[in-house]
Amino acid sequence: MRFGELTEYALFAAISIGLFVWGVFDGLNIVDRTIDIFFLIVQIRVPEALYSNIAFTATTIFASALLFKEIYSTSYLGKTTDGGKVEAIIPVYTDSGVLENSVKALNNSNYEDLRINVVCEEEDEASIEVAKELDCEVIMNKNPGSKAGAINTVFEMRDSKYYALFDADEKIDEDFIPHAVKYLERGYEVFQGRRVPIPTGGIEKFAYCERAVFHAAYKLQSLLGFLHAKSSSTVLTKETWRKVDGFDDMLTEDIDFSHKCYRQGINVKTDRRYTNLMEAPHSVKDFWEQRKRWLTGTVQIFHKGLKRNYQSSPLHRELFSIIRSFISFTLPILVLILFSNFLVLVFLGLQLFYVLPILATSLAPLLLSYKDSKIEEIDFIGWYAFTTFILTLLSGLISLKSILEYIFTWEGEWYLVEKGE
């Protein structure tokens, strides 16, 4: 084992244990509080763990309430079936087993003027063969090995009004593009919908629950003006692509693009009622490695911001972009302390209070899956929602591992999740 790897694993173990122990001792700390209500004075003594769990519960419920308000809103802008040429872009690499999902779904789209561009890698003969059998344009990536380069290839060779970005495994709703174009016609520059992992098994259901919690967290971020503009389930104008100087070759080019749009003040519309389906990880390894790639990519974006490698932008947007990326990979680590506090409440027998975070984190998966169960391929998530709190511990461990890997051992490699049956 190399010195860098040994250092990484040693620090991962030491910091994980250290945070856990810190959380236990901090949670056991007794805090005195005096409540003065008119003539009645009450003095209470409670463990510090109680306050952290109540704060976490309240924040989670508030975020879930914001999500509930959005996905159950009945106010719709409408849709447009012919508002100008739309270029659908599907970058592929070893996606021959799932490519048919996106292309067939787009062929059934209710939008009339739509061209489907599948961007392939020259050595990926299986995907090229499948793409040629489908009703689409087959294009070779001008920047081999780069998903960002594949997307930019179509922008550079086509001169259309709108561009719709999807992954090969997405099953796109037939009205997704008509709704998105309607928003762009009203002045928005980017439309971002929602992707739902299809919960076909245990690991897949965990992935669904985790995504639901993240969508609730995104609602909190939106209060501060940061909206995602990713490279899937997204429709944007060519002018927007020009303004931000296209997609950059990053580990998570989609999150990086979101930061670029925020920094340039791009007018983004996010509406999670417009939903597409995607394939979920089918193994613990794929789940872990995919999430680690996303978080490592966020660390890379933070590093890029510190090096001032973005286009010039207003100082307040530059600073918030850096702070937002930093919080994205450090906040999950603090959850390790919260989990320790949770165990303190269990040890002390305070059932009401240690049940609260479990119930709070189950809200978003329950709310979304009830809504999504109207989609043929999705069933109500049920009791799996109550395991979501445990996933918060896993996210903290993945985030810590991602930071240490980026510092000590990451050399630009990309983990590819198995797709297809």
Image (cartoon, rainbow, N blue to C red):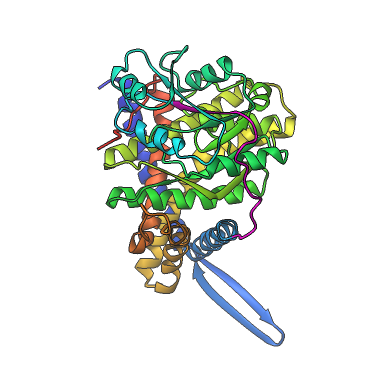
Which segment did they paint magenta?
73-90
Residue 74 located within the stretch drawn in magenta: yes
Please name the residue shown 56% across and 47% down the image: 218
Q: Nearer the viewer, residue 208 or 350?
A: 208
Q: Is residue 26 left or right of residue 377?
A: right
User: Does residue 392 appear anywhere in the picture?
Assistant: no
Residue 420 located within the stretch drawn in magenta: no
- Please, what is the dominant secondary structure of the magenta stretch? loop
In which quadrant will I find the C terminus?
Answer: top left
In which quadrant will I find the N terminus?
Answer: top left
Q: Is residue 251 left or right of residue 127?
A: right
User: Does residue 130 appear anywhere in the picture?
Assistant: yes
Please name the residue shown 38% across and 36% down the image: 169
Q: Nearer the viewer, residue 247 or 325?
A: 247
Task: From this view, report whether residue 138 is shown above or below residue 184.
Answer: above
Q: Nearer the viewer, residue 103 or 239?
A: 103
Task: From this view, report whether residue 240 is shown above or below residue 288.
Answer: above
